[in-house]
Amino acid sequence: MKDFLVIGAGSAGCVLAAELARRGAGSVAVLEAGPSERHPLVSMPFGLVWLMGGARDWRYKSARLSDAGGRQINIPRGKIVGGSGSINSMVWFRGRKSDFDNWDISGWSFADVEHAFEAVEARLQPTRMQGAHPLAEGLAPMLGSNRDAVPTPEYESAGVLAHNMLHTRRHSAADAYLRPSGVEIVTGVEVDRLIWDGDHAVGVLLVDGTEIRARKGVVMCAGSLATPAILMRSGVGPQDELNQHDIDTRVDAPEIGQNLHDHPGVGLHFEGAGTGYGLEPRQWLSWAVAPWRYYNGNGGRLASPTCEGGAFFNARGTGAMPDVQSHFIPFHLDSRGKRYALKSGYFADVCVCRPKSRGQLRLTSKDPKAAPFIDLGLLSDPRDLDTLVAGLTRLRALLALADFGSRRGREVHPGVDMTGDALREHVRNSVGTAYHPVGTVRLGGPVSNRLAVHGTRGLWVADASVMPQVTSANTNAPSMMIGWKGAKYISEDAA
Ligand SMILES: Cc1cc2nc3c(=O)[nH]c(=O)nc-3n(C[C@H](O)[C@H](O)[C@H](O)COP(=O)(O)OP(=O)(O)OC[C@H]3O[C@@H](n4cnc5c(N)ncnc54)[C@H](O)[C@@H]3O)c2cc1C
């Protein structure tokens, strides 16, 4: 029997499990529903194109977006060692310093979390991408940025991004922390719910009926969608909802599953011969030699994490702090979602840094195989729609200032003629997310500032679900920071 069970070997879970072991807190096993990350498509940055929607993705679907065209959208989440960090674009941002100060939780101001970021970065070694496409290199002039500087949410800036890649390979939390760490890694085991002794979490029940016990406790690192679902199936959640599913309530925690939010985003698609990467006939030879080039250590398009560049700016151009982030992908992305089109082009989106809209996650059944009801709440606050419309309009103007030279393409979707009310309607009917769901088990709500679940013993949550408000940029680095802080607190508190 181990001292600790960590549920989920994702971005946070890998850091947390390895750090618990390193700090001598006790023996640790991490239980992961998916398989090992040791697969060529995982280590090769461009491989994520095939990983998304495949067997290593949980392939969640949202509930109908009642304020965004009534559509259901895909929500990819990694089902693999390394979690979503094994299928993501590896874009590295801490967030904005004031994001953490605004959380207003003791122990989580920027001054408090900075050391954890530094420790994680010493292992992950994120760096500005080498060999970026000339289009990504051409972004900097659109906001007068220094060409070599990585953009930051602290002020208006554009350019090539930093990624957690090492020598053209993905370098995830699994690579940097879990292997080797002394932690037992158990793959292919899906947790249904917790086993209790009174209010003490003493182990887990797997979906196949197997019980695994722990001496000191259980740490939930299953991510913003699975962690609240497992807690609810274990009797920790809103009592009236648990009653509906015939689940005995252990702790009435009305906030679990609430406060779900993500960065809403909408993009512009550009096309043109000789612009970005794509399947136009003149690039067939380059694609044909790409594997040879990549496996000989010469990078190339297969070493691209797809999202190579980006920007932060104020949507209305008021000179105030940036309130939107743009991701720039120098690949042709078909606007109707067709995977293979014989064209080349590029794509840039706008995402709201600090969205106001909120949704919720609820169980549909106590059966662990039943997908939860995931209401992303996109655009439920109209201010997010206003910011996206203003941001797209300004993005068009800014891209016109980028140094794209002869590689400049034509906006084909939604098209430059789409402005005003038509653009507003377009945004409503096409908004998606940046794949950054957070907030369902927030710090200061169901969990204490030291990540313990209120009303229980031996139970902690340390993953993206605890963020009270999403950070202003991508969420992988903050999730790892949370794993690092979790290990510190748990090793002190469970001693
Ligand atoms: C396609 C995609 C692209 C992204 N791009 C970026 C990016 O470029 N930069 C960035 O900063 N962020 C990006 N993100 C977001 C970032 O990866 C996540 O915010 C981060 O990985 C969340 O970490 P986590 O530990 O909370 O959850 P995860 O990393 O998702 O880990 C949860 C783990 O728990 C496991 N699990 C779940 N349920 C169970 C169960 N019942 N039993 C056992 N195990 C279970 C899962 O399989 C998974 O391994 C992206 C996400 C996706 C999906």
Image: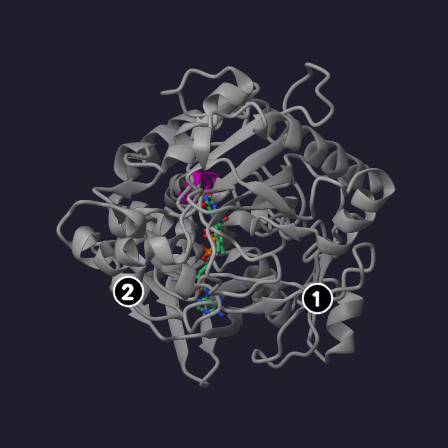
**159 w.r.t. 410: above or below:** above
Name the residue type under label 2.
Ile
Q: Secondary structure at mark 2?
A: strand
The residue at 29%/67% (across/down) is 36
The residue at 69%/36% (across/down) is 392
Residue 319 coordinates in the image, percent (x, y) = 68, 14
Number of the label disc, if any, that sits on residue 72: 1
Number of the label disc, if any, that sits on residue 185: 2
Q: Nearer the viewer, residue 40 or 3?
A: 40
User: Magenta span has 84?
Assistant: no
Which residues lie in the magenta part? Answer: 477-483
Q: Residue furthest right?
A: 421
Q: Residue furthest left?
A: 296
| 320 left or right, relative to 269 | right
Name the residue type under label 1.
Gln
Q: Secondary structure at mark 1?
A: loop
Q: Quadrant of residue 334?
A: bottom right
Mark 1 is surrounded, within 10 Å at the Cα level, by few (under 14), some (14 to 19) or many (20 or more) other residues, namely: some
Residue 435 coordinates in the image, percent (x, y) = 56, 52
The residue at 26%/57% (across/down) is 285
**316 w.r.t. 459: above or below:** above
**151 w.r.t. 476: above or below:** above
Number of the label disc, if any, that sits on residue 139: none
State which quarter of the image contains the N terminus: bottom left
